[in-house]
Image (cartoon, rainbow, N blue to C red):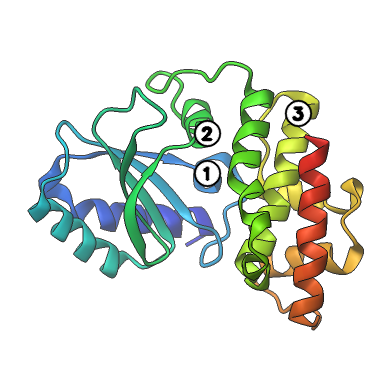
Amino acid sequence: MDDVAEGQALVDAHCGRIAALGAIPFLHGSLVLGGYHHGISDVDVIFRLDHPLTDDERVLVDAAHEESGPSLAASYVHDPCDPEVPHPTWTHGWSGDRRVSLITRAELHQAHPQVWPEIPDLAGVVALEVKRAWTRELRDPRTWWKTEYVDLALTSCVRALLTQADGQLTSKDSAIGHLEVFGVPERLAVGVALRRQGRVAPPQHRSQRAVQARREVRRLLAML
């Protein structure tokens, strides 16, 4: 079974666990748009509901995510119209309510154009969303000690810069391949690339990497 088939099997199994909800799944992210690496990439899904989740249904969903594992990232959306409205979300062992970002909505339109509307001014929207997400993280030096935040922030910034250049969404893999093009130091860029492939990156002192990554993200955000 190839990576995409394994990711789809994970979604199908999760859908079986929450069948009582009558939810309709809409995949987005790398599983449907390209660059999916099973066991490394998230499996991104939006579930459309015809009613808000009840407390009992949240218990059901919580148990389903426990069984499906932390890589299945899903929001359960009743009313999709307002992009500022938070929705029940499960991702990487965390659960709570958060909005479905305009970048996610753009991915949903690309994968399901008959159902999810187009996002106008995609380049501008992506830049604003990335700034919104990462500018506040720059205020906390502790964020940059976390490997997953280093990789995600650098990749997100370069994805936004590529979208700014051609007006199209791009994959994480493509963004990682452009890190050095946008001036990210080789050692930092190589570490991100190797981890994306499930390989071990060359050792780098965490405090040094944290300072360097935070500086690079600040620089890349200023380019948007």
Query: In the drawing, does residue 161 fall left or right of residue 118?
Result: right
Taking the image as shown, residue 172 lies to the left or right of residue 64, namely right
Residue 19, position in %: x, y? 15, 48
Task: Compute the Cα span from label 2 to label 3.
Answer: 16 Å
- Judge the density around disc 1: few (<14), some (14-19), many (≥20) Cα neighbours within 10 Å: many
Under circle 3, the secondary element is helix
Q: Quadrant of the C terminus?
A: top right
Up-down relation of residue 82 to residue 149 (above or below): above
Q: How far separated are the C-alphas under marks 2 and 1?
A: 6 Å
Amino acid beneath label 2: Glu
- Residue 45 image point, x, y percent: 39, 45
Q: Earlier in the sequence, mark 2 or mark 1?
A: 1
User: Of 144 and 47, which appears nearest the observer?
Assistant: 144
- For residue 29, which numbered disc appears in the image? 1
- Mark 3 and mark 1: Cα distance apart in space: 19 Å
Q: Is residue 54 found left or right of 169 in the rendered image?
A: left
What residue does disc 3 label? 164
User: In the rendered structure, which amino acid carries the disc numbered 3?
Assistant: Gln
Residue 188 % position (x, y): 82, 66
